[in-house]
Image (cartoon, rainbow, N blue to C red):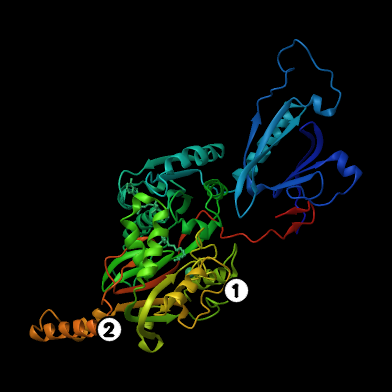
């Protein structure tokens, strides 16, 4: 790495020890002068060499001059005779910075540097502030929506106690709206909010609340650009404003899969440092009608039934999903229909490779460059060429489309561990009718490290578009029940006879669309590559890079 030129270098005190403190435009580093003279020491966490510490400037949250609390200042009564350099350091400033703890969690640590001269103290504060001001990706003004009823109903408390102090420390101004009803945030964003005032929108809640914010912003963008959302053929307009998610819901899968943890402080810090993670969005249509957008899971059969049942148990909080999960598993219902899809082409990998989407993912980067040259926007008319579509008919326990891994605390690797956040595809997982025991084996693999696709009754495809038609709708199109009178009745009684014979209940499931129930079962889905951006950076790998100058992990 190129050596950066120093902006400042001074001898300052930290906790009564003298350090050589240096600042360049990338790194703030401080080295214990006595230890450095004595030995090199072995590397320990947080200190790259014993007594040497550093922080990338892009991870500094704020710097503040500290009120001097030493007894000798301004009293004029007694003066301690300086015995060590630290004793004469009466002026101080504190640097607040990001520190990584366990499991992708961040927290805000701080270090206070003491100097002998007030002017030196001011110079440090001013120079660090100047460097922070150069980071134009950082938000200055945010619009915050809090769902007070999501998850364990702690959204307001989480925001007030854990997030607001961090925003305030980072001098971010906020307008906060506590929602008063479902869809309050969506409607406000869609029609009223003065979005020019803000650098981003923050959602405090779960996946359902995030979905509201995303719908409000995406629909607002399309309205302003004159794009008809009802047409599946339209190329949608990407959103400029980034969305931050402070997890306060029941599953919080969008947050977990884009940050790596469901920790409100971590999310707040990703917002403060101005991270940006592009993300795909699926549009879901029924005929020529737009239904919804989805970013995480579109699930028919098992996950549709779990959601339908769990909505009646909202009062239970997050536990409702476990109760409904067991109940749905025991009911062991399967559904018939036809799935057709347009497979993804090119270097987009497969759902069974081990190329997990991580910070700076090369697959997503490639999709971003392809998007810029208009390469990955397959026009719907190309896609209409039926030869390229794969058609599968069958009886399914579950049909899941995972546009991201869908990792969450219940399923740490997610429903599709190798799905990408921003590659313009979704992983279509078909679980065919099988025994209860086999289905249980498959479900349990969502919670452990084994390959959940390694079963004869599971197929998985990486796709750009797909459609689903439930069996009865297929029959409807063969025999129009509305105007065929006696023929229609004959057809219905035939279905009933068939199902009496096999003993199963002919039925349809619902689609679970990011935790919301869709009103239609026949749907057409198209992935729109990188339509929105989050204040996130994807899941970080363990840090492996080291700055050869400071030996600082960067
Ligand atoms: N003030 C409100 N009163 C009632 N419902 C609300 C309010 N604000 C938002 N909602 C709705 O509450 C629903 C659930 O919220 P949220 O997603 O925050 O929590 P959750 O469902 O417990 O978590 P998850 O979606 O992660 O499983 C959302 O669909 C949202 O539209
Ligand atoms: C009988 C054993 C059942 C074990 C099932 C474990 C699998 C849990 C996987 C959780 C699904 C994560 C997908 C996320 C979906 C969200 O969009 C949605 C809204 O928050 N959550 C749910 C549960 O539908
Ligand atoms: Ca994707």
- Between 21 and 453, which is closer to the camera in this rendering? 453
Q: Is residue 237 visible?
A: no
Residue 303 appears in which quarter of the rendering? bottom left
Q: Which residue is labeled 1 in the image? A: 354
Q: Residues within 10 Å of mark 2 (few under 14, many from 20)?
A: few
- Identify the residue at image location x=67%, y=60%: 542
Labelled pair 1, 2 in contact (Cβ < 8 Å): no
**What residue lies at 41% left-to-right and 72% top-to-bottom?**
400
Q: Nearer the viewer, residue 48 or 387?
A: 48
Q: Earlier in the sequence, mark 1 or mark 2?
A: 1
Which quarter of the rendering shows the C terminus? bottom right
**Dividing the picture into quarters, in which one does residue 526 lie?**
bottom left
Number of residues whose C-alpha sits closer than 10 Å to that of mark 1, classed few (under 14), some (14–19) or many (20 or more):
few
In the figure, is residue 53 to the left or right of 449?
A: right
Identify which residue, 465 or 367, lies in the foreground: 465
Vertically, is 113 above or below 225?
above
Residue 284 % position (x, y): 34, 69
Residue depicted at 54% across the width and 65% down the height: 413
Q: Percent x, y for residue 307?
A: 35, 62
Q: Is residue 8 visible?
A: yes
In the image, residue 326 sits, relative to residue 498, either above or below, namely: above
The CA span between labels 1 and 2 is: 41 Å
Label disc, if present, on residue 502 of the rendered structure: 2
Return the x and y of residue 146 as percentages of the image width and height: 40, 45
Q: Residue furthest bottom?
A: 387
Say whether residue 157 is left or right of residue 497. Answer: right
Identify the element where label 2 is drawn: helix
- Position of 50 relative to 276 (above/below): above
């Amino acid at each position: 790495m190129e050596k950066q030129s120093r902006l400042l270098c001074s001898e300052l005190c930290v906790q009564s020890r003298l350090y050589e403190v240096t600042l360049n435009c990338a790194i703030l580093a401080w080295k214990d002068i006595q230890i450095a003279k004595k030995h090199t020491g072995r590397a320990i966490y947080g200190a790259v060499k014993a007594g040497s510490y550093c922080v990338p400037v892009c991870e500094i949250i704020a710097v503040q001059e500290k009120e001097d609390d030493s007894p000798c200042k301004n009293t004029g009564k007694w003066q301690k005779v300086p015995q060590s350099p630290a004793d004469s350091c009466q002026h101080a400033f504190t640097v607040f910075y990001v520190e990584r703890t366990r499991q992708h969690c961040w927290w805000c640590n701080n270090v206070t540097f003491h100097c002998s001269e007030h002017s030196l103290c001011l110079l440090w504060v001013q120079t660090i502030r100047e460097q922070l001001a150069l980071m134009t990706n950082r938000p200055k003004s945010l619009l915050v929506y809090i769902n007070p009823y999501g998850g364990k109903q702690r959204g307001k408390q989480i925001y007030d106690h854990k997030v607001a102090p961090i925003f305030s420390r980072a001098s971010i101004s906020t307008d906060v709206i506590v929602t008063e009803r479902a869809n309050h945030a969506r409607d406000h964003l869609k029609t009223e909010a003065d979005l020019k005032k803000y650098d981003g929108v923050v959602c405090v809640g779960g996946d359902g609340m995030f979905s509201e914010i995303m719908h409000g912003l995406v629909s607002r963008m399309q309205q302003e650009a004159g794009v008809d959302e009802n047409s599946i053929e339209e190329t949608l307009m990407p959103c400029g404003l980034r969305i931050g998610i402070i997890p306060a819901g029941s599953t919080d899968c969008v947050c977990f899969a884009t940050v790596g943890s469901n920790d409100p402080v971590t999310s707040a810090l990703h917002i403060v440092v101005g991270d940006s993670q592009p993300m795909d969005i699926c549009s879901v249509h029924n005929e020529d009608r737009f239904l919804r957008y989805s970013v995480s899971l579109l699930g028919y059969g098992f996950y549709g039934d779990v959601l339908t049942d769990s909505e009646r148990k909202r009062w239970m909080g997050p536990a409702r999903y476990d109760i409904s999960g067991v109940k749905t598993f025991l009911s062991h219902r399967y559904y018939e229909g036809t799935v057709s899809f347009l497979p993804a082409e090119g270097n987009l990998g497969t759902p069974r490779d081990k190329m997990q989407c991580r910070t700076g993912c090369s697959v997503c980067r490639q999709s971003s460059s392809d998007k810029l040259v208009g390469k990955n926007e397959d026009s719907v008319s190309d896609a209409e060429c039926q030869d390229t579509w794969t058609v599968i008919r069958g009886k399914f326990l579950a049909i899941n489309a995972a546009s991201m891994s869908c990792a969450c605390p219940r399923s740490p690797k997610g429903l599709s561990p190798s799905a990408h956040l921003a590659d313009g595809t979704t992983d279509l997982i078909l679980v065919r009718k099988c025994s209860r025991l086999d289905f249980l084996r498959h479900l349990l693999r969502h919670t452990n490290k084994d390959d959940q696709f390694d079963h004869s009754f599971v197929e998985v495809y990486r796709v750009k578009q797909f459609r689903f038609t439930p069996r009865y709708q297929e029959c409807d199109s063969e025999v129009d029940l509305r105007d065929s009178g006696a023929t229609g009745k004959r057809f219905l009684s035939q279905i009933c006879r068939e199902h009496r014979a096999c003993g199963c209940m002919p039925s349809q499931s619902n689609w679970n669309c990011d935790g919301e129930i869709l009103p239609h079962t026949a749907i057409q889905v198209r992935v729109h590559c990188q339509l929105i951006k989050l204040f996130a950076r994807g899941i970080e790998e363990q840090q492996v890079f080291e700055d050869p100058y400071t030996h600082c992990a960067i």
